[in-house]
Image (cartoon, rainbow, N blue to C red):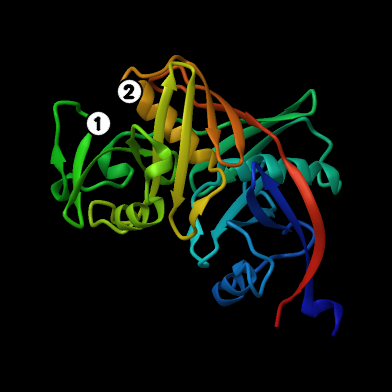
Amino acid sequence: MSASATQKFYKMHSLGNDFMVFDGVNRDFTPNRELIQSWGCRHTGVGFDQLLVIAPPEHPDVDFNYRVFNADGSEAEQCGNGTRCVTALARSIGLTKKDNLVWASLAGRFETEVRNGQFNTTMTVPVLENTAIPFDPSHATSTDHAHVYRLDVGGETYEITPVSMGNPHAVLFVDNLFDLDVDRIGRSITDHPAFPERTNVEFCQIVDRQFLRLRVYERGTGETRACGTGACATVVAAHLLDHVNERVKVSLPGGKLKLEWRGGANPIYMAGPSTLVYEGEVNLL
């Protein structure tokens, strides 16, 4: 097999949210939905929640472009945990020596920082306007709270808070995370007509004003071990309902994230780990 028929990749994860990452700077990466689906299969391929691409910048004030693909081959706007992985990889393979990077994604620009071995991301400002999420309230019932709606799903009713972190989210607050059929409920809400571009679904249990437990069903992937944008959306929803303080720890099945949001038009700060698992090559044919 010729060298041109293969391409190097890096398997990475953050809190068990795992990724197949490509260096699209030194060699162009052309997305192919069928190949992405094949690589994403955990039984016959590499297996991942998302495929990430570090791409050349399209603007002079940006260090890199950032592309995200779900395991079903669909392109996503953002992946919060992935921001730390691409930052770590860009530095480790010599694409940059900078501690502070500016990235451009479909969700907008964001910044990452390396400080004392920890990777921090300044995410985009959360969006609550229904049309921009996008969320169609004509398929839901309003409540006494401006940001909370009731959805009828399969004969059951759920109260959700729609939030966009550049990608759509529906946040639910529950009493017990461990007695939920996250796969069934998550899939039903993901495909609900109230979300014309489908949505990620967060199930949150409030422990106290500084600590949340979370499980996430990701659009195009299913339940994952962790989700950075999901954690951000959940903190926003909890803040809107006055459940939390500005600084919050969010515990997911894969581990904990530290987040801070001061409300309003402020961005969300998120800190967590990044791990390189192995390097490999895949067939492009």
Query: Would you say 245 lies left or right of 79 here?
Result: left
Residue 63 visible in rendering: no
Front in this rendered view, residue 59 or 64: 64
Q: N-terminal of the two: label 2 or label 1? A: 1
User: In the picture provided, is 33 more to the left or to the right than 172?
Assistant: right
Q: Give neighbour class at mark 1: few <14, some 14-19, many 20+ (Cα, 10 Å).
A: some
Element type where label 2 sits in the image: helix
Screen quadrant of the N terminus: bottom right
Left or right, residue 133 beside residue 59? left
Mark 2 crowd level (few <14, some 14–19, many ≥20, 10 Å Cα): some
Asked if marks 2 and 1 touch (Cβ < 8 Å), the reply is yes
**Where 135 sits versus 117, above or below?**
below
Q: Is residue 119 above or below residue 1?
A: above
What residue is shown at x 46% (from left), y 45% (from top)?
216
The amino acid pointed to by label 2 is Leu
* Image location of residue 180, percent across then percent down: 37, 46
Q: Is residue 15 above or below residue 4?
A: above
Q: Residue at x 33, y 34 (%)?
A: 174
Residue displayed at 77% across by 30% down: 99
Q: Could you tell me the amino acid type at mark 1?
A: His
Provide the residue designation for mark 2: 240
The picture quadrant where one finds residue 160 is: top left
The percent coordinates of residue 163 (x first, y second) are 35, 37
For residue 279, which numbered disc appears in the image?
none
Q: What residue is at 78 percent from the left and 52 percent from the top?
A: 277
- The secondary structure type at the circle numbered 1 is loop
Q: Distance of mark 2 from mark 1, alpha carbons?
A: 8 Å
Would you name the residue on which mark 1 appears?
147
